[in-house]
Amino acid sequence: MSIDWSYAWQALLKNWPMFWHGVKITIAFAVVGTVFGFLIGLVIGAIRAVPIDPLDSPAMKALKKVGRALTGLYIWVFRGTPMMIQACFIYYLLRPVLNWSPITAGFIIISINTGAYMAEILRSGIQSVDPGQVEACKAVGMTNFQAMVSVVFPQAIKNTFPAIGNQLVVNLKDSCMMNAISVTELFFQASSIAGSNMRFKEIYLDTAVIYLILTTLATWILNLIEHRMNRDHTESSAKPAGKKKKIFMEMSS
């Protein structure tokens, strides 16, 4: 039952090239899956957040309802089934047609899966923005698209940034599910090493420590970015107030 700590350290050094290859694949999956999942979620979230205006034409109302139904089905399926099952089903279903590699399939699958979660995150962010701001944009001649891109999306992204960053951390860990389709990420490499020398406890201890380091670094970087965003917002909000105060003092004198 005991763990040979000395062997765990030696095994990490000896097999570091294999571990490092797995780390690079894991980071690539997490970053690509989060970025493309964010883009998918932005589109899906916008479709689900756009209200059905009573002044819309019947065709537009029908189009919005169909869009909501399809996006709702997508979110329901990909949030309601395990990523490992999705990976196996989609990879083997489309392999005869696309003849794709496990790496390519993995990137697409993790992006689609992340997009389902991002869609709900961003939908809540979009709906948290005061509708009066959109009405103000329309009053100055902006279209719905311009209002969403220039006013709503920036605020929605800022409001939901912690949840978006958390999805990156989740993807760092959940990328191990891609080993089901033979993607050589960190867990796949660890299993290969452990199986070759039958020292499962020590190898998986090394793997757990590596995952912990990766998630800790990602969390630290995301916290720095969030702090910078909040600081910039505070400074930009303070500047107009300071300018108004200066003008008021000049007028008083």
Image: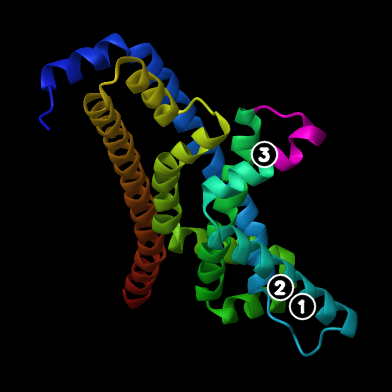
Q: What residue is pinned by disc 3? A: 91
The reply to whether the C-beta atoms of the residues labelled 3 and 2 are less than 8 Å apart is no
**What is the C-alpha distance between the residues marked 2 and 1?**
5 Å
Viewed as shown, does residue 38 lie left or right of 228? Answer: right
Q: Does residue 217 show up?
A: yes
175 versus 200 height, above or below: below
The residue sitting at 41% across, 28% down in the picture is 186
Element type at mark 1:
helix
Mark 3 or 1, nearer chain start: 1
Q: What residue is pinned by disc 2? A: 68
101 versus 110 height, above or below: above
Start-end of magenta stretch: 92-101
Check disc 3: other Cα within 10 Å, few if <14, some if 14-19, many if 20+: many
Check disc 1: other Cα within 10 Å, few if <14, some if 14-19, many if 20+: some
**What is the C-alpha distance between the residues marked 3 and 1?**
31 Å
Q: Is residue 16 magenta?
A: no
Element type at mark 2:
helix
On the image, which quarter does residue 206 sit in? Answer: top left
Label total for image: 3
On the image, which quarter does residue 45 sit in? Answer: bottom right
- Residue extending farthest bottom: 54
Percent across and percent down for residue 29 are: 51, 35
Q: What residue is pinned by disc 1? A: 65
Colour option used: rainbow
Q: Mainly helix, strand or loop, the magenta region?
A: helix
The reply to whether the C-beta atoms of the residues labelled 2 and 1 are less than 8 Å apart is yes
Residue toward you, 210 or 178? 178
